[in-house]
Image (cartoon, helix red, strand yellow):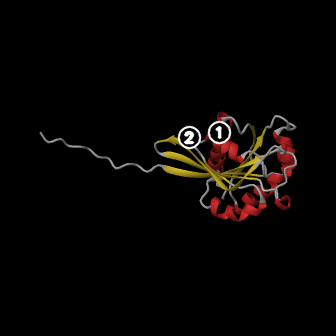
Amino acid sequence: MVSVRSERPARIPTALKILIAGGFGAGKTTMVGAVSEITPLQTEEVLSGVNDADDTQGVEGKTTTTVTMDFGRITISDDLMLYLFGTPGQDRFWFLWDELSEGALGAVVLADTRRLADCFPSIDYFEQRGTPFVVAVNCFDQGKQFGTEAVAGALDLDPGVPVVPFDARDEASARNVLIELVEYVARRQLTGVSR
């Protein structure tokens, strides 16, 4: 008896690239680590302290920094995967951003209300390139809590840019931010807003 195997070609899933950006110590590495289904690739190095290269005011307990990127993955279905790329936060590593942002669906800008001004460079970067982004306010235990409207006003965001409070350490909270980003990108596409 001859058996006939039906071999379907393996489907290659659609991969969506999402950037996780923000200032130094805002929680980018923590978010990628909390939500990734794989052990994330992290390029953390010990802070050097040389020439005061890293301003730790407000994040005094921080001892490491991302020097290239963080990488994580989430499988949504057999046909869809999210690839998360955490960007380095200090300006001396911004030369990497153009490469990391190539082909990205959108971005999450992490905001730390203890150092809110640190997320302005990320917002400016994505606005100048027309990359859709949401702002995720990382609710640190010791940070002062502000409403989403207050944060949007302080950051002078365009109307409609979502601002979402979340906890970077919590998987469900981080997933909700990613869902908000994907839904925001879909709304923009439906209304014909160009990138």
Q: Residue at position x 20%, y 43% from top?
A: 4
Figure check: 101 above or below 147: below
Q: Residues within 10 Å of mark 2 (few under 14, many from 20)?
A: few
Q: Position of residue 3 (x, y in %)?
A: 18, 41
Residue under circle 2? 37
Q: Residue at position x 68%, y 41% from top?
A: 177
| 190 sits to left or right of 58 | left
What label sits on residue 11 in the rendered view? none
| 7 sits to left or right of 81 | left
Q: Please tell me which residue lies in front, 158 or 178.
A: 178
Point out the image quarter for the C terminus: bottom right
CA distance for labels 1 and 2:
9 Å
Residue type (three-letter) at the residue carrying disc 1: Ala
Q: Secondary structure at mark 1?
A: helix
Residue type (three-letter) at the residue carrying disc 2: Glu
Q: Please tell me which residue lies in front, 55 or 36.
A: 55
Q: Residue at position x 74%, y 59% from top?
A: 127
Point out the image quarter for the N terminus: top left
Q: Residues within 10 Å of mark 1 (few under 14, many from 20)?
A: many
Q: Secondary structure at mark 2?
A: loop
Q: Residue at position x 29%, y 46% from top?
A: 7
Q: Position of residue 36 (x, y in %)?
A: 59, 42
Q: Position of residue 26 (x, y in %)?
A: 77, 46
The reply to whether the C-beta atoms of the residues labelled 1 and 2 are less than 8 Å apart is no
Q: Is residue 121 visible?
A: yes
Q: Count how many numbered circles sit on residues in the image.
A: 2
What label sits on residue 34 in the rendered view? 1
